[in-house]
Amino acid sequence: MEEPRPDGIRRRGSVTYAPSAQGTQLEVRGLTRTFGDTTVVDNISFSVEPGQMTGFIGANGAGKTTTMRMMMGVLKVTSGEVLWNGRPITRTDRAACGYMPEERGLYPKQSILDQLGYLGQLRGLTRAEALAEAQRLLERFSLGDRKKDKLETLSLGNQQRVQVAAALLHQPSALVLDEPFSGLDPTAVDSMVELLEEHMARGVPVLFSSHQLDLVDRLCDSMVILDGGKVLASGTADELRDSRPLRHRLRCAQDVGWVRGMPGVTVEDVDGCQATVALADDDARHALLQRALDSGLREFTDLKPTLSEIYREVTR
Ligand SMILES: Nc1ncnc2c1ncn2[C@@H]1O[C@H](COP(=O)(O)OP(=O)(O)OP(=O)(O)O)[C@@H](O)[C@H]1O
């Protein structure tokens, strides 16, 4: 979805923006958290770059929420540090962040506009500014006519949108969002992504956790895969793909059962004239293609792994 252009300007969806020279970089270095004798986040390091969207993925209990809580100062760090543009993060820096916690934190029985106005004031806006910004965000999410309603009267997806609005009220310098897309329909995902991209265009780094791997694959510049409190893999989607063994699809006019037993060829699947294989080296490739030509070679394609496949492989 991202088209690099020669001038360095990138297009994502319908938003065009130039990389900011002054964005914020968020980094965790050697971050660790123990509860009693149990280490739930174990010496992890990664960075979230200015203007980039980083997906934080991992099974239930992997340690994503605990990491985000430490980043936001909600939970004490056992060891390690959180850095803001390369130096230890301060309270002021954290106040400039937009954080959507797992436990959400808005009041179900209070009117949406009232509580967004209040939250905006807590983050340094005047009441008038907070209400104006809340109203603007609610309009963006097509919730303008629900502003006087209690939060609990909205559908879960719409409550989620209000929670994200709460994190965006004060033009945050960085965004840390715990499962912001869960429960949203595809249109709601797109409108939220569009909004986040406007913030990224200001150089805001976005870290979000998700179990929706297809979404992370589609949206993220880079990703961090956490398992059992450890970072198993991190990098851009292409870096992660390039670090995995390449597989190939082979299709011939005749049966390709002969791939089984060829030296240096690992056979993942054979079905009549088609097979999926991994090759140990150039010799194996050469031998396979020679044999395939005799069988009427129709196709030999590199198969790049999807993020789901990478995730399953690294967490196996
Ligand atoms: N306050 C706490 N006391 C004891 N253990 C805790 C506490 N908070 C979290 N844990 C444990 O830390 C581990 C990591 O939990 P965490 O919520 O960070 O995982 P997660 O990756 O966010 O999971 P999910 O995808 O289900 O939200 C879990 O085993 C959890 O039970």
Image: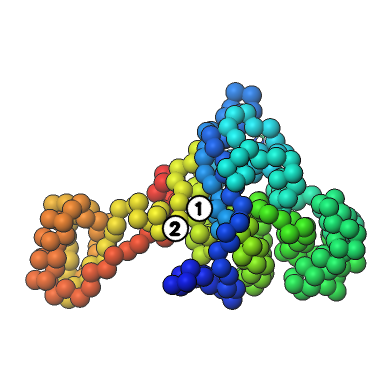
Q: Which mark is residue 237?
A: 2
SS assignment at label 1:
strand
Q: Which of marks 1 and 2 is nearer the N terminus?
A: 1
Amino acid tagged 2: Ala
Above or below, comparing residue 19 to residue 240 in the picture: below
Location of the C terminus (image quadrant): top left
Above or below, comparing residue 3 to residue 209 in the picture: below
Horizontal side of 309 relative to 154 (left or right) equals: left
Q: Which of 24 and 237 is in front in this view?
A: 24
Instruction: Tell which residue pokes out farthest to the front in this image.
Output: 21
**Circle 1 Cα neighbour tier, 10 Å, few/some/many (<14 / 14–19 / ≥20):** many
Quadrant for residue 193, please give it: bottom right
Instruction: Tell which residue pokes out farthest to the top in this image.
Output: 37
Residue occupying image coordinates x 24% and y 64%: 275
Residue occupying image coordinates x 60% and y 23%: 37
The residue where tag 1 is placed is 223
User: How many numbered discs sit on the rendered protein?
Assistant: 2
Q: Which of 175 and 103 is in front in this view?
A: 175
Disc 1 + disc 2, Cβ < 8 Å: yes
Horizontal side of 91 relative to 10 (left or right) equals: right
Image position, residue 44 (x, y; %): 52, 37
Image position, residue 270 (x, y; %): 24, 62
